[in-house]
Image (tube, rainbow, N blue to C red):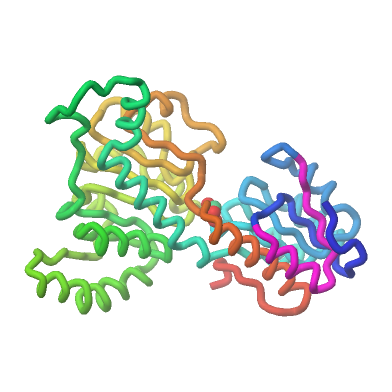
Amino acid sequence: EVWNPNGKYRVVSTKPMPGTRWINLLIQNDCRLEICTEKKTILSIQDIIALIGDKCDGVIGQLTEDWGEELFSALSRAGGKAFSNMAVGYNNVDVDAANKYGVAVGNTPGVLTETTAELAASLSLAAARRIVEADEFMRAGLYDGWLPHLFVGNLLKGQTVGVIGAGRIGSAYARMMVEGFKMNLIYYDLYQATRLEKFVTGMLPLTYGAFLKASGETPVTWKRASTMDEVLQEADIISLHPILDKTTYHLVNKERLSKMKKEAILINCSRGPVIDETALVEHLKHNPMFRVGLDVFEDEPFMKPGLAEQKNAIVVPHIASASKWTREGMATLAALNVLGKIKGYPVWFDGNR
Ligand code: DGY
């Protein structure tokens, strides 16, 4: 699909993206926009090299694509200076290779913070209240009357939520769980406690803590853990929000799973390889009261053998950022990044900060 065929700058998007703002932004700024409408979900490196062609000023790509040496050298040969992932995560991008070929990299943070945190919260609730199992039970025609023991789950109020990775999304999730469900909070950040630290030391005690006290409620507690193990041992729900890099690959492994409470709930809306999924399947098999809510998988689009059969797992297909507002925002930011570089403005990239 080609927009503004006579535009001066050739920009390629490897997928159609939601909304029209991003398209207008590019075509009103002298870009010839080519959108790949190829039906297959995951494009190969060769497919993308063909899309780049002989002349290409910038590419908007997707997290399913492997942006390494081959693609950045092809883009640079075609005169390209900009690449933006339509994602906040950029573990599919070899930033050193991009630098080597003089291609600026962009990502799309901010617009997906709340949407992603809301999915983590949804999975937390769904797991705590066994919503998916109960839905399957109803549809199977098994409900024959109210019973005291039917699908008894956990009350979140007063339980402890553990957040690993206290950046934008982890902090937004923590606030939802603390303010919305009156959970106590324990959190750990591998690098630094940035946003969550501000919330915990600033707004939470001043506003929410005071409010709870005034209304006669037991105040929630909050603390920054000095080790990850503290979170694993104390939390009833643990939600993972780190970036994926060498230090976070298999961050949750067999040993760490064994440190969690037998009835804990583990949520992952970050990247699949943060959990050793094979170890997780074994853990789920041997601990029927342990539950997980997973949006991401180690070998997407596949699940490790045995995971789909586990009743104590809720699995959804990497949809954490899938709200209309967010996806349109991501597309617009990705277009702005590429256009920015072409026009000499800054490109938004977390990796530079
Ligand atoms: C991201 O942006 O990194 C998500 O995984 C998809 O929205």
Q: Which residues are magenta?
A: 19-38
The vertical placement of 319 against 114, above or below, is: above
* Left or right, residue 25 beside residue 122: right
- On the question of residue 294 being in view, the answer is yes
- On the question of residue 226 being in view, the answer is no
Q: Percent position (x, y) of residue 351?
A: 56, 66
* Left or right, residue 319 beside residue 107: left
Could you say which is closer to the camera, residue 95 or residue 223? 223
Q: Percent position (x, y) of residue 292?
A: 34, 39
How many circles with numbers are drawn on the protein?
0
Identity of the residue drawn at 63% across and 57% down:
86
The vertical placement of 160 against 290, above or below, is: below
Q: Report the image quarter containing ligand 1.
A: bottom right
Could you say which is closer to the camera, residue 215 or residue 246? 215
The vertical placement of 336 against 71, above or below, is: below
Is 20 inside the magenta-drawn segment? yes
Q: Which picture quadrant has residue 165?
A: bottom left
